[in-house]
Image (spheres, rainbow, N blue to C red):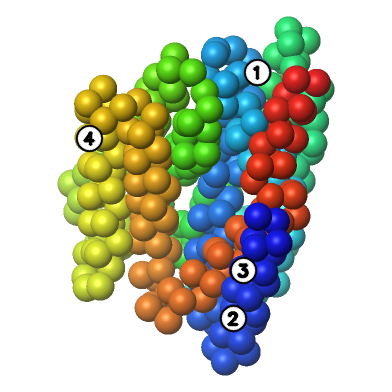
């Protein structure tokens, strides 16, 4: 498993490097899409482990190998973010043409030094939390888990604006931080369900099924309300975000994401008919694929179709190297289980 992941990851990254040589702008834009996608299950797993350390519950014990292993891979994001930071002028219009921004916005928020600083602080903080998970356990670890969740809530709100929303300067969404946090939790629950459904007991499967179902409903509600508020306000600068994504071919990814969300929801509802374990695996796979479609819909329309192939190569490369670096999924799961027990 480790060798296969390493080979696939290296081949994909070599393909991305070739794309970057031919079209550096499109390749870096694709890297951002892949980076956001691969970060979701890692950061979602980190948040879910902190939630479990704070609140308890059988689901966290049962799926600890998958969730803890994914959470412990968070430091890899410090490496994966480098092309985004160094290539920001080819990704973000505000970085290439700072004069196009409002002077106050440029001075106090959207400028390269502060953009880099915010990303570095967030990623170092997340990495420090992930490396401290073995100490955040038991009654004495609840304070640490609570403080970690506070940091996560602030950090995800800030980098959500930096990494995603700033692809269109001037576009704002007050609920996007929560939207991104729910995406991350949904990705983590889906990853845990996909990998761990066969080995856990029925009660824990039911718990994770409920959490995944809640994440699907939460994300649907947040995105619909964001659209409704903007559309009802009838403000052309904000409407432009949705108008671009309603044109061919960009409506396709979100419709696919919606269809996969319906598949996941139906599978969870009829789980007694098809079996709880199979239902959770089907729903988990649909959620992971649907989230990828949704993230493509969020970012790629601002860049154009040329970023899609580099995005696929970047995502495959980052995921492959991540699995290889952590020793492959089976060993990774055992490591997470040992760390949780400690």
> Is disc 3 placed on a helix, strand or loop?
helix
Q: Which mark is residue 266?
A: 4
Q: Is residue 56 above or below residue 292?
A: above
Q: Residue furthest bottom?
A: 22
Mark 1 and mark 3 lie on one chain; the one further toward the N terminus is 3
Is residue 178 in view from this perspective?
A: no
Q: x, y (%) of residue 184?
A: 50, 41
Q: x, y (%) of residue 64?
A: 63, 26
Looking at the rendering, which quadrant does residue 127 occupy? Answer: top right
Q: Residue at x 74, y 49 (%)?
A: 326
Q: x, y (%) of residue 273?
A: 22, 26
> Is disc 4 placed on a helix, strand or loop?
helix
Residue contact at pointers 1 and 4, CB within 8 angstroms: no
Residue contact at pointers 1 and 3, CB within 8 angstroms: no
How crowded pointer 3 is (Cα within 10 Å; few <14, some 14-19, many 20+) is rated as many
Q: Residue at x 55, y 78 (%)?
A: 27
Q: Residue at x 78, y 10 (%)?
A: 140
The residue to which callout 3 is attached is: 8
**C-alpha span from label 1 to label 2:** 41 Å
Looking at the rendering, which quadrant does residue 205 occupy? Answer: top left
The residue to which callout 1 is attached is: 53
Residue contact at pointers 1 and 2, CB within 8 angstroms: no
Depth-wise, is mark 1 or mark 3 nearer the camera? Answer: 3
Mark 2 and mark 4 lie on one chain; the one further toward the N terminus is 2
Q: Which mark is residue 15?
A: 2
Q: Nearer the viewer, residue 202 or 231?
A: 202
Mark 1 and mark 2 lie on one chain; the one further toward the N terminus is 2
Query: What quarter of the picture does the C terminus occupy?
Result: top right
How crowded pointer 1 is (Cα within 10 Å; few <14, some 14-19, many 20+) is rated as many
**C-alpha span from label 2 to label 3:** 11 Å
Q: Is residue 124 above or below residue 338?
A: below
Q: Which mark is residue 145?
A: none
């Amino acid at each position: 498993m480790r060798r296969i992941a390493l080979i696939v990851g290296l081949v994909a990254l070599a393909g991305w490097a070739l794309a970057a040589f031919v079209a550096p702008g499109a390749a870096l834009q694709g890297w951002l899409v892949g980076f956001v996608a691969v970060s979701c299950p890692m950061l979602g797993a980190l948040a879910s482990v902190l939630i479990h350390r704070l609140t308890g519950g059988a689901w966290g014990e049962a799926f600890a190998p998958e969730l803890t292993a994914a959470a412990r891979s968070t430091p890899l994001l410090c490496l994966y973010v480098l092309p985004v930071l160094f290539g920001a002028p080819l990704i973000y219009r505000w970085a290439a043409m700072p004069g196009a921004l409002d002077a106050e916005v440029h001075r106090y928020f959207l400028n390269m030094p502060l953009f880099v600083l915010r990303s570095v602080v967030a990623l170092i903080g997340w990495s420090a939390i992930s490396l401290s998970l073995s100490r955040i356990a038991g009654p004495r670890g609840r304070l640490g888990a609570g403080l970690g969740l506070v940091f996560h809530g602030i950090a995800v709100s800030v980098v959500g604006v930096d990494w995603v929303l700033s692809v269109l300067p001037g576009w704002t969404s007050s609920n996007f931080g929560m939207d991104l946090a729910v995406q991350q939790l949904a990705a983590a629950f889906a990853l845990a369900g996909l990998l761990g459904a066969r080995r856990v007991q029925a009660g824990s499967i039911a718990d994770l099924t409920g959490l995944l179902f809640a994440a699907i409903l939460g994300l649907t509600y947040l995105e619909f309300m964001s659209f409704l508020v903007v559309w009802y306000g009838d403000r052309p600068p904000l409407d432009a975000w949705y108008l671009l994504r309603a044109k061919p071919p960009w409506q396709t990814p979100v419709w696919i994401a919606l269809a996969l969300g319906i598949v996941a929801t139906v599978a969870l509802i009829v789980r007694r008919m098809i079996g709880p374990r199979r239902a959770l695996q089907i729903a988990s796979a649909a959620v992971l694929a649907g989230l990828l479609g949704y993230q493509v819909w969020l970012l790629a329309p601002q860049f154009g179709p040329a970023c899609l192939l580099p995005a696929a190569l970047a995502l495959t490369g980052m995921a492959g190297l991540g699995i290889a670096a952590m020793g492959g999924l089976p060993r990774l799961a055992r490591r997470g289980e040992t760390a949780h027990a400690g």
